[in-house]
């Protein structure tokens, strides 16, 4: 369980930070407020991404196993 929690936190950190930066950049371009707005978006996105990844991770692994098994 400890491995699953840490793995979920790390993966959700990377995904939410990169995705929120990308969407912020698409919406704002290279502007003066990009970093502050990205930080706000990331702060909201990471907890949501962690919860979603924790609960849907096992389902995703089962679907992957079926597709590739």
Image (cartoon, helix red, strand yellow):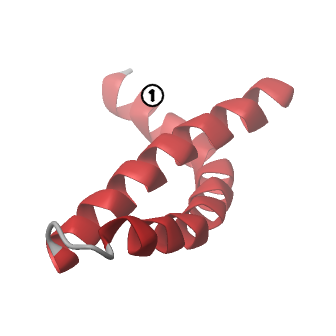
List x then y, in percent, for residue 4.
73, 32
Q: Is residue 1 left or right of residue 40?
A: right
List x then y, in percent, for residue 21.
33, 59
Neighbourhood count class around disc 1 (C-alpha, 10 Å): few under 14, some 14–19, many 20 upward: few
Residue placed most toward the observer, 53 or 59: 53
For the point 16% across and 66% down, the residue is 30
Say if 55 sits above or below 26 in the image.
Answer: above
Residue placed most toward the observer, 18 or 62: 18
Q: Is residue 11 left or right of residue 69?
A: right
Name the outermost residue toward the right: 2
Residue placed most toward the observer, 13 or 7: 13
Q: Is residue 68 left or right of residue 30?
A: right
For the point 44% across and 41% down, the residue is 63
Residue 32, quarter of the rendered image = bottom left
Residue 28, quarter of the rendered image = bottom left
The N terminus: image quadrant: top right
List x then y, in percent, for residue 69.
38, 20
Mark 1 — residue?
65
């Amino acid at each position: 369980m400890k491995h699953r929690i840490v793995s979920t936190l790390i993966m959700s950190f990377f995904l939410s930070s990169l995705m929120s930066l990308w969407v912020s950049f698409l919406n704002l371009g290279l502007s003066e407020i990009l970093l502050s707005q990205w930080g706000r978006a990331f702060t909201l996105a990471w907890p949501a991404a962690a919860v979603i990844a924790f609960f849907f991770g096992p389902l995703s692994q089962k679907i992957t196993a079926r597709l590739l098994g």
